[in-house]
Amino acid sequence: MDKPNNPVIFVGAGPGDPGLITVSGSKALAAADLIVTAGSLVNPEILAYKKDGCEVVDSAPLDLSAITDILAEGHRKGRKVVRLHTGDPSLYGAIYEQFLVLRERGVPYEVIPGVTAAMAGAAALGLEYTLPEITQTLILTRMEGRTPMPQGEDLRSLAAHRASLALYLSAAVGGEVSAILQEAYGEDAPVAILYRVTWKDQRIIWTTAKGLPKTLADEKLDRHSLIITGPALAALKDGGNTPKSRLYAKEFTHGFRDGEDGGPA
């Protein structure tokens, strides 16, 4: 019998470091009777939050039907079920197709967001993606692979904006990525490759748009790697001053700071 007050909870595990799961996510794991985890993509150390006796199922060898069968059956039996995804579930998590099946079966669900690799990568680099007068846009995307890209969302079209760019799931096609990045940002544009960011074996490798394919090959990286580039990264690599935000300028006023004339912002 379905219990509307006992939803299947989709939890974002974060980028890898067990400390970067949210408090709500860790509480959901601690209460779970069944955790269906996304295999090697999720750091197994995160399962330390689970209680004794909690059943853990690795979804890596399972297809959509098998995964949703397990989730629905666990719910039907009144168990507290967690579906544990890497990073944030809403980004390349293939969660919507799971939602549709659960909805058809009358199984309620909810989502606890997580920290995605692009944010963890910025923290590891000491990078601000949105620098005043340099770039105010961050594009999260991927190179086309087995999953085709929608019209207008190919990497060449997006890179043409010359904004901050974080590429997921693209290390295996470094040559194609390199050609597009050189065209948009220039062959000497700095590129940061972050392998398994926040994991114990994290690696941060600097290269250029032109040097990207060789670096990936030399480092033997074809997965678990985030590729970051753009003018904000170039500013970080250069180490020079950039235009200051008006937010903290002495003369800038707003609703919580009076101007020098004592008047409201």
Image (tube, rainbow, N blue to C red):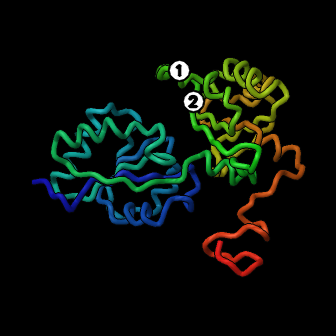
Percent position (x, y) of residue 21?
51, 59
**What residue is at 38 percent from the left and 33 percent from the top?**
61
Q: Residue at x 29, y 41 (%)?
A: 99
Mark 2: which amino acid? Arg
The image shows residue 168, relative to residue 136, as above or below, that is above
Which residue is more in the foreground, 58 or 115?
A: 115
Seen at 68% across and 50% down, the residue is: 122
Q: Position of residue 174 (x, y in %)?
A: 68, 23
- Residue contact between numbered discs 1 and 2, judged by CB atoms under 8 Å: yes
Amino acid type, mark 1: Gly
Residue furthest left in the image = 1
Q: Which residue is mark 1?
A: 145
**Above or below — where is 234 with respect to 51?**
above
Quarter the N terminus occupies: bottom left
Foreground pick, 232 / 96: 232
In space, the residues marked 1 and 2 are separated at their CA atoms by 9 Å
Counting from the top left corner in percent of width and height, residue 218 is at 77, 26
- Work out whether residue 115 or residue 217 is closer to the camera in this orientation and state it: 115
Element on which disc 2 rests: strand
Seen in the image, is 130 located left or right of residue 189? left
- Asked if residue 105 lies left or right of residue 247, the reply is left
Residue in the picture at 32% in, 60% down? 32
In the current view of this chain or complex, which residue is farthest to the bottom? Answer: 262
- Judge from the rendering whether residue 171 lies leftward or rightward of residue 93; answer left or right: right
Q: Residues within 10 Å of mark 1 (few under 14, many from 20)?
A: few
- Residue under numbered circle 2: 142
Image location of residue 109, percent across then percent down:
27, 51
The image quadrant that residue 256 belongs to is: bottom right
Residue 92: tell me if it is visible: yes
